[in-house]
Amino acid sequence: MPELVYPPVITAAKTLFRVLDLRLNVEGGHHVPRTGGVVLASNHVSYLDFIFCGFGAHGSRRLVRFMAKHEVFAHKVSGPLMRGMKHIPVNRRAGAASYNAAVEALRRGEAVGVFPEATISRSFVVKDLKNGAARMAQEAGVPLLPVALWGTQRLWTKGRPKNLTRRHTPITILVGEPIDPAAHPDANALTAELKTRLTELVDRAQREYPESPAGPDDAWWQPAHLGGTAPTLEEAAALDRPRRPTPTP
């Protein structure tokens, strides 16, 4: 079927990049195969990460089908767009159906995008990964690519007001070398390798990022281990824990 929705959305996104004069730095895009199934597994620091992870595959002319929570598909504006771009809804109450849909897409030769941390990392370092991306790559017999994003949190992230009019922001997109799922004995071992590779790429993106916080009030987007004021992994986990309702007397 012809792609009627995805190309205009890409054009609109690239226009916005130009308007905001985002300083996009994409490295390793050649690792994305031009044909055939592939899993792109990205770290997650922003609500906009799917846009920039997908842009990392643009040089290979691939349209990435992202797995996203089903609530996005239920929205009256985003829903038709998500369905038109053939993204894959994830219903946590019926996870097997979402997983099977992703595997089938990979077997058809699609590029599937996954955020294996499941939720945005408030600490801006890589959290423990779910093994779904590894299992999909193994079952479909396709390569697994780590993708590191950095700078996207400065536009819109969890717990901070969005700043979609911010201009000249550097955005780093690093696509790592493919991981062969056949070289790892099980999904947990493959997930451990993915976390190692992803962490190395994120660390590199952070070290080489061309800007530093302008002062103490701007240090929120920098991880604690680099002197920023973002919460540590442990503090972030506490913030993400569901709060129990206070019992009524």
Image: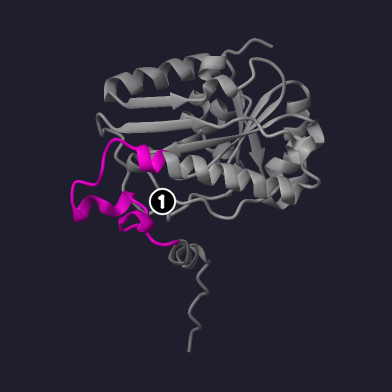
Position of the N terminus, as image quadrant, is top right
Residue 55's x, y, as percent?
48, 24
**Residue 193 versus residue 240 in the image, above or below:** above
Visible residue check, residue 47: no
Stretch in magenta: 205-232
Instruction: Judge the density around disc 1: few (<14), some (14-19), many (≥20) Cα neighbours within 10 Å.
Output: some
Q: Which is more toward the observer, 86 or 167?
A: 167
**Residue 149 versus residue 213 in the image, above or below:** above
Query: In what element is the residue under mark 1?
Result: loop
**Quick check: 69 left or right of 246?**
right
**Quick check: 80 left or right of 151?**
right
**What residue is at 37 percent from the left and 53 percent from the top?**
223
Q: On the image, which quarter does residue 190 sit in?
A: top right
Residue that carries the numbered disc 1 in the rendered image: 158
**Residue 233 versus residue 136 in the image, above or below:** below
Magenta span includes 47: no
Residue 78's x, y, as percent?
51, 32
